[in-house]
Amino acid sequence: MSQLVVTTDIPLGDPGRGVFAFRVGDKVDETDVKQNGWEDYVSGPNTKAARQAVSTATSERE
């Protein structure tokens, strides 16, 4: 099963509530992405966008 990296926070329910299914830098299964229509929120793990998302998430957590 392939893992994708979240490049934009994925809202859970209504986007304005501030509740998220996944946050930038998280990894999510490709099957979950396809089932939920989250393709616009993720990128492959070896892309520039994915590396930047992980870097951003890591620096925000420190």
Image (spheres, rainbow, N blue to C red):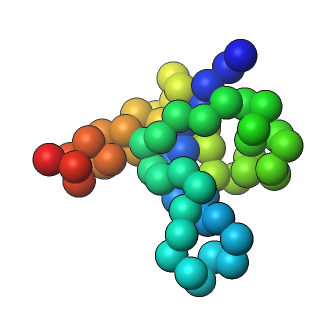
Left/right of residue 62 with respect to residue 29 in the rendered view: left
Q: Tell me residue 59's x, y (percent).
A: 20, 47
The reply to whether residue 8 is visible in this rendering is no
Q: Tell me residue 46's x, y (percent).
A: 51, 23
Q: Residue at x 23, y 53 (%)?
A: 60
Against 8, is 28 above or below? Answer: above
Q: Nearer the viewer, residue 51 or 34?
A: 34
Left/right of residue 30 with respect to residue 9 in the rendered view: right
Which residue in the rendered view is the most extreme toward the top? 1
Dividing the image into 4 quarters, which one contains the N terminus?
top right
Q: How many marks?
A: 0
Q: Tell me residue 29's x, y (percent).
A: 67, 30
Which residue in the rendered view is the most extreme toward the right? 35
Which residue in the rendered view is the most extreme toward the left? 62
Which residue in the rendered view is the most extreme toward the bottom? 16
The reply to whether residue 47 is visible in this rendering is yes
Q: Nearer the viewer, residue 4 or 47?
A: 4
Q: Residue at x 31, y 48 (%)?
A: 56
Left/right of residue 26 with respect to residue 32 in the rendered view: left
Q: Residue at x 60, y 35 (%)?
A: 28
Against 27, is 10 above or below? Answer: below
Q: Tell me residue 9's x, y (percent).
A: 53, 59
Against 37, is 3 above or below? Answer: above
Residue 15 occupies quadrant: bottom right
